[in-house]
Image (cartoon, grey):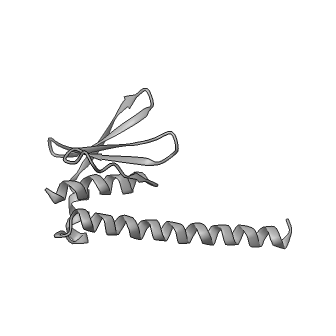
Amino acid sequence: MSQTAFDSQAIHKESFANAQFELDNSIYYQAQLIAPDFTDIKIKAAITKTEIDSIADIFGALYRVWDGMKLLGTFYENLDGKWIAMPCNRDDFRPALNTSDQAHLAVVASYLQV
């Protein structure tokens, strides 16, 4: 492989890393907007006490986020590979995220707002 190809791959990886960093910061900022009164520690504590299960659907798995017997919301991976979070307490918030962890965070952060 030529040096130009290696340089191109390195630039691509760096661009991807920068884009991922910007996305992660954006998700964090959005989570803070959703639940401004909660610190990272409270969000992490809420996430660790939630449970996730899944049910089969014709399009794939639908993941459900539970706090005890209370359903906080669901998330799934769409056909484009994005994870769609659907908190139970909001109809206007359906973010398309890159990872299932981000979708889980969005559901929990939305619940903490209430």
Q: Is residue 96 depicted above or below 71 in this figure? A: below
**Residue found at the very far top of the displayed protein:** 58
Q: Quadrant of the N terminus?
A: bottom right
Q: Is residue 8 depicted above or below 101 in this figure? A: below
x, y (%) of residue 71?
A: 19, 42
x, y (%) of residue 29?
A: 33, 69
Task: Please name the residue shown 69% across and 71% down the image.
Answer: 10
Q: Is residue 19 left or right of residue 28?
A: right
Please identify the quarter of the rendering in which residue 35 is found. bottom left
Task: Please name the residue shown 21% across and 44% down the image.
Answer: 88
x, y (%) of residue 14?
A: 62, 72
**Residue found at the very far front of the displayed protein:** 92
Q: Is residue 20 depicted above or below 90 in this figure? A: below
Total labels drawn: 0
Task: Please name the residue shown 31% across and 57% down the image.
Answer: 105
- Pick the residue in front: 49 or 86: 86
x, y (%) of residue 47?
A: 25, 57
Q: Is residue 89 left or right of residue 9?
A: left
Q: Quadrant of the C terminus?
A: bottom left
Please identify the quarter of the rendering in which residue 113 is found. bottom left
Q: Is residue 65 left or right of residue 58?
A: left
Task: Please name the residue shown 63% across and 68% down the image.
Answer: 13
